[in-house]
């Protein structure tokens, strides 16, 4: 397949007015919030260690197993913020409107791991010793998407922010705890605004570089992976998360892929050459494949939930 590549310097230069406009809009609608106000401190008590508190045991957690899995995956994903900052700062730069956005995004994202960790500790939702071991391993390993172009990075962060929004929102709704639901809804609201920013940039990129931008989006969606896939035990956790409906292929298709393609008006996008048209065909085929895979997964989850097939 022929490729259409657009140099990073050109993309940065031609999209900078869009960054300035979208950043101004973001700052006008984003509301700062205080993580400590979302933590049920009254439920907390000292742990074993220097404070001679009570050691954690599994019986102390009232949250469903799949919710605990989702909280661990979401938290460890948020913990890798240093890697994400490095990657987008390297790709987008640290100067001008791009740099202002990079630092603002990082400051907003930094609240998420802070409040999530405080919540799971206060609720004694998960083993804090095991969680810290996973955090050290996750951050020490880091994360690198390995995406080939800046347009691929822009497409990836758009999809990833939307997927993360939905994962947080659904985990909160499933936890059966008002404090947890409020906290996750607050985090999801941040992720939604970040997605809106990136989606606006991707929209403008599709106007400026239609073939290259749409090909990048097709590449990203066809091979999309959440940044938490390297977490030890991820596959088993993901299976339980999917089986209970927090995040699975149905969610991915209905709340991420389909609305994004509609918002970007992919089916009616003008000005495409052969590469862009091929990318549009690839996206249509991908949606069909996702729907078929989602249907097969629903049957599997039904068997899991009926007890005829064990969840890992």
Image: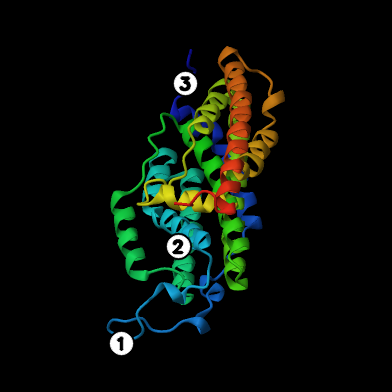
Query: In the image, what residue occupies the spot 27% across and 84% down?
Result: 50
The picture places residue 49, in percent across and down from the top left corner, at 28, 81
Q: Nearer the viewer, mark 2 or mark 3?
A: 2
Which SS class for mark 2?
helix
Task: Determine which residue is flagged by label 2.
Answer: 113
Counting residues from the N terminus, which is met first, the one under dot 3 or under dot 1? 3
Which SS class for mark 3?
loop
Horizontal side, residue 120 vs residue 202: left or right: left
Task: Determine which residue is flagged by label 1.
Answer: 52
Task: Determine which residue is flagged by label 3.
Answer: 5
Question: Taking 302 as reference, is 183 above or below it?
Answer: below
Q: How packed is label 2: few (under 14 Cα within 10 Å), some, or many (20 or more)?
A: many
Q: Nearer the viewer, mark 3 or mark 1?
A: 1
The picture places residue 196, in percent across and down from the top left corner, at 62, 46
Which image quadrant is residue 29 in? bottom right
Evaluate if marks 3 and 1 touch, with contact meaning CB atoms under 8 Å apart: no
Q: How packed is label 1: few (under 14 Cα within 10 Å), some, or many (20 or more)?
A: few
Q: Nearer the viewer, mark 2 or mark 1?
A: 1
In three-dimensional space, the C-alpha distance between marks 3 and 1, rounded to whole angstroms, equals 60 Å
The picture places residue 99, in percent across and down from the top left corner, at 46, 47
- Can residue 292 be seen by looking at this rendering? yes
Which image quadrant is residue 261 in? top right
Residue located farthest toward the right when viewing the structure as drawn: 268
In three-dimensional space, the C-alpha distance between marks 2 and 1, rounded to whole angstroms, equals 26 Å
**Mark number displayed over residue 115:** none
Question: Taking 248 as reference, is 74 above or below it?
Answer: below
Residue located farthest toward the bottom when viewing the structure as drawn: 52
Query: In the image, what residue occupies the spot 38% across and 69% down?
Result: 127
Counting residues from the N terminus, which is met first, the one under dot 2 or under dot 1? 1
Counting residues from the N terminus, which is met first, the one under dot 2 or under dot 3? 3
Query: In the image, what residue occupies the spot 70% across and 34% down?
Result: 262
Which SS class for mark 1?
loop
């Amino acid at each position: 397949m022929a490729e259409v590549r657009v140099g990073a310097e050109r993309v940065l230069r031609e999209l900078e007015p869009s960054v300035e406009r979208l950043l101004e809009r973001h700052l006008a609608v984003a509301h700062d919030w205080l993580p400590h106000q979302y933590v049920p401190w009254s439920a907390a008590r000292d742990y074993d260690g220097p404070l001679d508190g009570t050691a954690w045991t599994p019986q102390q957690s009232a949250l469903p197993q799949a919710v605990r899995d989702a909280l661990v995956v979401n938290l460890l994903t948020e913990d890798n913020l240093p890697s994400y900052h490095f990657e987008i700062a390297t790709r987008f730069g640290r100067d001008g409107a791009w740099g202002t956005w990079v630092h603002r995004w990082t400051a907003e994202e930094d609240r998420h791991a802070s409040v999530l960790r405080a919540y799971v500790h206060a609720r004694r939702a998960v083993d804090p010793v095991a969680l810290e071991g996973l955090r050290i391993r996750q951050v020490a390993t880091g994360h690198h998407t390995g995406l080939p172009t800046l347009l691929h990075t822009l497409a990836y962060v758009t999809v990833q922010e939307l997927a993360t929004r939905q994962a947080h929102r659904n985990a909160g709704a499933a936890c059966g705890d008002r404090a947890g639901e409020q906290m996750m809804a607050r985090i999801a609201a941040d992720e939604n605004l970040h997605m809106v920013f990136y989606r606006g940039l991707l929209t403008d990129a599709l106007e400026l570089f239609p073939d290259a931008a749409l090909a990048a989006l097709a590449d990203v969606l066809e091979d999309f992976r959440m940044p938490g896939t390297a977490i030890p035990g991820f596959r088993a956790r993901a299976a339980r998360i999917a089986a209970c409906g927090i995040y699975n292929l149905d969610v991915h298709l209905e709340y991420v892929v389909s609305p994004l393609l509609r918002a970007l008006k992919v089916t009616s996008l003008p000005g495409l050459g052969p590469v862009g048209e091929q990318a549009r065909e690839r996206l249509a085929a991908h949606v069909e494949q996702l729907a078929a895979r989602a249907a097969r997964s629903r049957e599997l989850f039904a068997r899991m939930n009926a007890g005829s097939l064990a969840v890992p």
